[in-house]
Amino acid sequence: MFLRFPVLPRSLLAARVLGFPSSPMSAPAPAMATLVSNLTVAEDTAAAPSPTAPTTAAPAAATALPSSSAPTTAAPPLQLFNSKTKKKELFVPRVEGKVGMYVCGVTPYDFSHVGHARAYVAFDVLYRYLKFLGYEVNYVRNFTDIDDKIIKRANQNGETVTSLSSRFINEFLADVAELQCLPPNEEPRVTDHIEHIIELITEIIKNGHGYVVDGDVYFSVASFPEYLSLSGRKLDQNRAGSRVAVDPRKRDDPDFALWKAAKEGEPSWESPWGHGRPGWHIECSAMSAHYLGHVFDIHGGGQDLIFPHHENELAQSRAAYPESEVKCWMHNGFINIDDQKMSKSINNFFTIRDVITLYHPLALRFFLMRTHYKSDVNHSDKALEIASNRVYYIYQTLYDCDETVSLYREENTSVPVPAEEQKLVDNHHKAFLECMSDDLRTTDVLDGFMELLKAINSNLNDLKKLQQKLEQQKKKQQQQKKQQQKQQKPQKQPEDHIQALAALSAEIKNKLSILGLMPQSSPLAEVLEQLKVKALKRAGLTEEWLREQIELRLAARNNKLFAVSDQIRKDLASKGIALMDEPSGTVWRPCERE
């Protein structure tokens, strides 16, 4: 069988633009660990393959081809960093095969910022990996839909608290869907659980850990010796007026509100202490217990929640029900801008909506995942552009692979996956499991894709050369036989390359899906086009203007005005646009700005 490849696959050209080798024999690529980048909903991971034998079947375009040999390496025991014990620990769920996970959600009074995306992408990765490992996960993520900030913003807007919070809940859900975060099993709102909050406060008071002052209810920190066991802080660090409200009616400065007496113009509910509303911290204690029980496996959130929010949660829950326990507390790092934490309170933030206007949502996800979840991420346009270009390279390579393999979908080949590529697939699968089971080392996982991508491009290149060679040899059959007799080592045939491509592509797609990085709502061709549209927008260019520049450059080259043509190329490269000359004409792709 013969295939004609008139042009070099664009992923090879893209690799050259990005400085990646197109073959494992080329000069080594720049270490991905030096690149600051990051990679939302892949197919429901309930249907994900077993961690001991992930599917490595050929992509849909090559369904007639036999499946490659699936790796059978079992996942190592999962270890997660516990913020309470300050060390990595073997994860053993309370109930075998089941995991209860609670992650603190947003206060919906405005569009969510990239710091929120950092948290929910991090815990989406954990959620997906737990499901991949075969656990039945009950994932709960709440909405704090009654809060001082919401009340203030609603009054400023002249609307109800419910109207404001519901609107921004919907906006948040739209944003995380763009980032391909799987929806949690439960997304409770505080205002739907007032009854459970009142019951919990009643139990705290009954056990001697709460007291009532003029319709307000406070938690007595002095009555609870375990206080600060999560954060490791000292009581003298709790300066009144800093993170704890100043109120002369309190017994002690560190005491915090469980229930706030009603104020004029604020929503309120009837309670044993009069009309009022919940304090901030009590809500998560009540909702986590309601959906997961008093003992559950994982409680997550940003590092800023360790104190006071999670510290107070822990105290409230155990003060009411001493058997309450979270097996593993997990916290993600911040997003920093100029070495300062991104925060709405100091107007130092970019919304998710702002960023995905200029960058593809999967580029933002990749950017966030390029840094380990516990570490801080420094936000910059350069880092986002690098992430966008890496994502483009990955998808262009997979697209080229699919296009080539699809040409063989009718062939009934029975050759196995070549040993070299099968070893790459097996090693990648093993390394993926080792990295993910070691506290979700996504930085190393993303680096690990490079070897498989280089192998795909190497096979595409070799296959193209082989087809050209076979076409020439067809005309010289006698000469071909003599050459084959002289060969010391069997050469790969087209079907060998196709099986290699199918296996390599399937392994990459399988693992990208587990990470939430495999596009689901659009085919690869559309996602590549979307990435190009975003690149033009960042550069302030239009497709029409770019085409004119390409025509001007072509005219300059035809007239041997090479200085002019080279200047056009350099000017475009400075705007993040790379030109590539192919036999069929000049094409362009996004690139890092020169």
Image (spheres, rainbow, N blue to C red):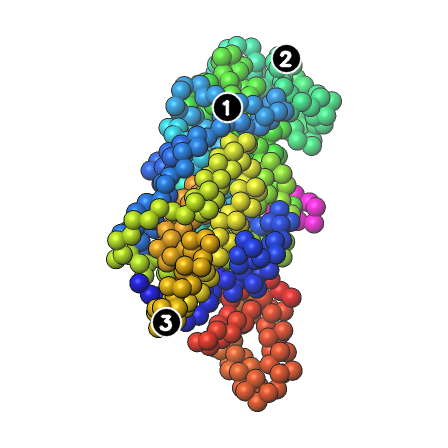
Question: Mark 1–mark 3 contact, CB under 8 Å?
Answer: no
Of tags 2 and 1, the one toward the viewer is 1
Of the pair 312 and 545, the residue shown nearer to us: 545
493 up-or-down from 373: above or below: below
Q: Name the residue at 60% across, 60% down.
A: 19
Q: Which mark is residue 91?
A: 1
Of tags 1 and 3, the one toward the viewer is 3
The quadrant the C terminus occupies is bottom right
Mark 2 residue crowding within 10 angstroms, few (<14) / some (14–19) / many (20+): few
Residue 43 in the image, given as x and y percentages of width and height: 36, 44
- Residue type, label 2: Pro
Question: Dot 2: what SS?
Answer: loop
Residue identified by numbered label 2:
225
Query: Which stretch appears magenta?
Result: 337-346
Of the pair 443 and 30, the residue shown nearer to us: 30
Q: Name the residue at 39% across, 28% down.
A: 135
Q: How far is mark 1 from mark 3, CA to CA?
A: 64 Å
Residue identified by numbered label 3:
476
Q: Name the residue at 63% across, 38% down.
A: 375
Q: How far is mark 2 from mark 3, CA to CA?
A: 89 Å
298 up-or-down from 553: above or below: above
Residue 482 in the image, given as x and y percentages of width and height: 40, 64
Question: Mark 2–mark 3 contact, CB under 8 Å?
Answer: no
Residue closest to the far right: 236
Q: Name the residue at 51% across, 21% down.
A: 327
